[in-house]
Structures are given as C-alpha cells and as structure tokens.
Amino acid sequence: MAGSLRQRTDRGSDAWELRVYLGRDAVGKVRHRSVLFRGTKRAAQRELTRLSAEQDRAPAIVPDEAAREWGPATTINDAIEAWQANGWDDLSPSTTRRYEGVWRVNIRDSIGRRLIASLGPYEVERYFRDLKTAGLSQASVRYVRAVLHRACRLARKWSNNTLPNPITDTELPEWSLAEKAPAVRSPSAEEVRLLLAAAGDDRDPRVPAFVRLLAATGMRRGEACALRWDDVDWDGSAVRIDEALVTYTGGVTVRGPKTRASVRGIAVDGPSIERLRRLRDHQVELAVASGVEVAGDSFVFSYEPGGQVPPYPDTLSHAFSALRDRAGVASDVHLHSLRHFQSTELDRVISESQKQARLGWSTVHMARHYTGAVSAEDRRAAEHMGSLLG
C-alpha cells in the first residue's frame, strides 16, 4: 500500500506524520490513515513500512470518516478544529465569526500549537499575562480564555477523560481602572432629543422611526431589525419581541433572541407608535407602487418593497452615525448607547426587576412569570420615556 511521511515541526523537531492509503469509501472518496510518530526520520520510515504492510494484510474495510485519535499528541488547534466540525453549527453566526477571529489572531499560531497534555495552569496564566502585556483588553483576554476552556473541555470528553483540561483552574490577570476600556456612556435626554430632531429632517422615514423606537424601548439593534408588523399591537400601544437579526460573513439571518428572557412584550408611548404608523403608511405606498403587498410578517424597517427582506443592521448603524454628526452629538454616543439611556432613566420610575424585564435581561426571567406582558409599571415606563423624548 502507498504511504507518505512529512515532518510536523509545529509539534516538535522529532514529530512525523505518517499517512497510509486505505482505499476509497462507498462514495468514492480517497481515505488515509494518519499517525503521529516521534523519533528519527529513519525510524519514521521503518514505522511507515510496517504500517503499510499491516494495511496490506488487513481486510479492505474503508471507514466513511477518518477516525480522529485523541491522546497525548492532541494539540489545542486539533481540539478547536474538531469543535468547528462538530458543534459550531449550533452557534449563532456572529458567535462563530467571533470564535474564528479569536482563534486565528490570538491562539492558532501560539498556544494553539501546544499539546493539551503538556500544558499546566501556570503556563496558561502566563500566556494570558503575555496577551495583556501585548495590549489586549480585559474583555478580549476573557474571550480567549472562554474559547480555550470550551475546546479543552470537549477534548477531554472526546478522549474519554484521558486528556486534562488545563484551563479549568486558571485565573485572568487583574486590570486597573486606568487599564480598563471606558464604559459605554449613557447620553443625556437633551442629546437624545437632538438626535430625534435631526432625524426628523431625514428623507428616509425608517431612520427617525428606528432611532425613536430604540430610544423609547431600549430594544437591541438586532431585535428592532427583526421586528415585523404582526409584532406591533396598535390598540394596546405595545410591541412583542421574539426574534433577533444577526450578521455573518456574507449576509444576515433571523433567529431566536439572545436569551429566553429576551422574549417579551413591552409598552410603547403614543408618539413612538404614531411614528411607526407613519412608517407603515410609507411602506404600503412603496409596495403598491412596486406591485407587491405589505404582509403581517413583513419586516418593519425593511428597505425592500413589501418588506420580505430584513434590513442589514450595519446600514442602520451607519445611518445613526451620520445622524449623530448632523445633530452635533459627541462621537462616544453609539446606537447601543440608547439602550444604556433607557436603563439609566428608568431607575427613577420603576423597580429594578421591572426594568430588567423591559430590557430582556435573563436575571429576571422567572420574576416575569408573575407580571403581565405589559404591566401597569411598564406602561408608566413607556410614558416616562415618551415624555423625555418629546
């Protein structure tokens, strides 16, 4: 049987990958068996000859998938690659994109090459400190640790607990207040009113309605982008949030919201509902002119006639940035700052648990079982935010 070998310098100067040809599987795909061998090149060649002869004598059974061996030769990169093939499909596109970036930039060409079995907490913590010294933020290093921990936990499971998880007992270095990234600033009510006044001059009715809704409700950007006309309760002046839009390389997708607690109904003040009503009238006019209809499942902020295609979130973020510049508002106010504005202002009028329920934080998921979808307290929150926005 044919075979080949190549040196694996990423696993040490004495590491060799031996590949033995197995044949073709049931669908005609060529299959090989790969073995990591340590020793001299001459010894590796002898082992390859032995493996090839062994395969010649073995029954011609070709597996559908090449089996991955888990043991002392498994690296962190091996674990992450296996996780990619068996698990990443269950994650949201934005999460997988973030994991891919963390692996490519911070892990793959450094600690990713290390054997899991050879790592200990001391070396891992020193690696975290090196990342901090290189200028990574506390949040970024925490994310690196999360990816490493999950990959090594899976490798331990897939190896039937023969591999350790060297990340489990590790701790992150400390960041002083001066080293930490500044917190997102909540804009003042006056700044938000300036934004809304500038939005009133926008020729695109989506932008003022979008900004007004986020300021009035504290919705996440993805939640607002996924809002459909069926989600608007015109008579009850409320909206229901049960979907979110996430971006990935090449497009967007609609999925369930961030957590189960994010599924909620919230009150909306009268002027904000009226802004949505005017937007719907505009969307209907556009649809009629294009020979299509606006249906109940049409997206509220869609840029397509008929609204069957959701808006691309970054488009609305760029529109907000342009709006902020026109309004003369400081550049540290971002679209997500409107959520912080909601949280800050509601401290004065409703309880902490109701505020968390309105914003869709999972810490009060059970508490909301004992309140209505739109409680009197939440209605008071909506009217308070409407009075602030004018």
Image (cartoon, rainbow, N blue to C red):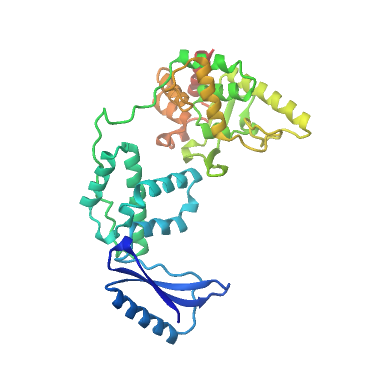
Along the line of sight, which residue is nearer the eye, 45 or 107? 45
Compared to residue 383, the image places residue 371 above or below, namely below
Quarter occupied by residue 201: top right
- Residue 296 % position (x, y): 68, 35
**Residue at the image position 48 percent from the left and 20 percent from the top:** 381
Compared to residue 101, the image places residue 137 above or below, namely above
Asked whether residue 86 appears in the rendered view, the answer is: no
Compared to residue 247, the image places residue 68 above or below, namely below
- Residue 230 % position (x, y): 65, 33
The quadrant of the rendering that contains the C terminus is top right
Asked whether residue 343 appears in the rendered view, the answer is: yes
Instruction: Report the residue that reaches farthest toward the bottom.
Output: 57
Along the line of sight, which residue is nearer the eye, 244 or 21? 21
The quadrant of the rendering that contains the N terminus is bottom left
- Residue 151 % position (x, y): 36, 54
**Residue at the image position 25 percent from the left and 39 percent from the top:** 133
